[in-house]
Amino acid sequence: MMKTKVLPLIIISLLLCASNSYALRLGEIASSGVLGQPVNFTIEVTDMFRLNPDEVKARIATEKEHDAMGVAYPDVPLDLKIVLESDKKGHRFRITSNKPVREPYVNFILHVESSQSQQFKEYTLFLDLPTRP
């Protein structure tokens, strides 16, 4: 009797562990952006599990993906470069632009995919006001 109750729990536990074995987790956004300047910010990748960093790609979600998630597509042109950086401290996406951003905040969805999974996460980037000399 005890065997029949424990076996399903073991199977469920193994399935849950297996589903996370090739996943990654996205952390918070950290900005050093100033209104009217190109942006430079990072998004921490808190866990890479068994993923090879070369297999992980990120981009701003398309307008259709934003609509499907009920999030307005950014009005500002997002000429963003997204690169996964790795060092002793961990992994992070470095996101930069060549053009200045003229809105005080930008709300967007980041789409991250690897050979094993994909995920979407909404972020809001708040830009600092320029300082006067």
Image: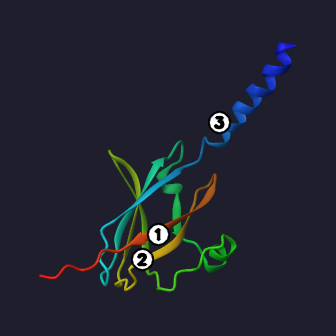
Of pointers 1 and 2, the one earlier in the residue sequence: 2
Left or right: 129 with respect to 15? left
Q: Residues within 10 Å of mark 1 (few under 14, many from 20)?
A: few
Residue under label 1: 124
Q: What x and y, as percent, mark residue 71?
A: 61, 74
**Furthest-left residue in this view:** 133
Q: Residues within 10 Å of mark 3 (few under 14, many from 20)?
A: few
What residue lies at 62% left-to-right and 58% top-to-bottom? 118
Q: What x and y, as percent, mark residue 129?
A: 28, 78
Q: Amino acid at mark 2?
A: Tyr
What residue lies at 66% left-to-right and 77% top-to-bottom? 67
Tell me the number on the disc at residue 105.
2
Task: Pick the residue in front: 124 or 56.
Answer: 124
Q: What x and y, as percent, mark residue 12?
A: 75, 33
Task: Pick the residue in front: 113 or 2.
Answer: 2
Left or right: 132 with respect to 74? left
Task: Pick the residue in front: 92 or 6.
Answer: 6
Helix, strand or loop at label 2? It is: strand
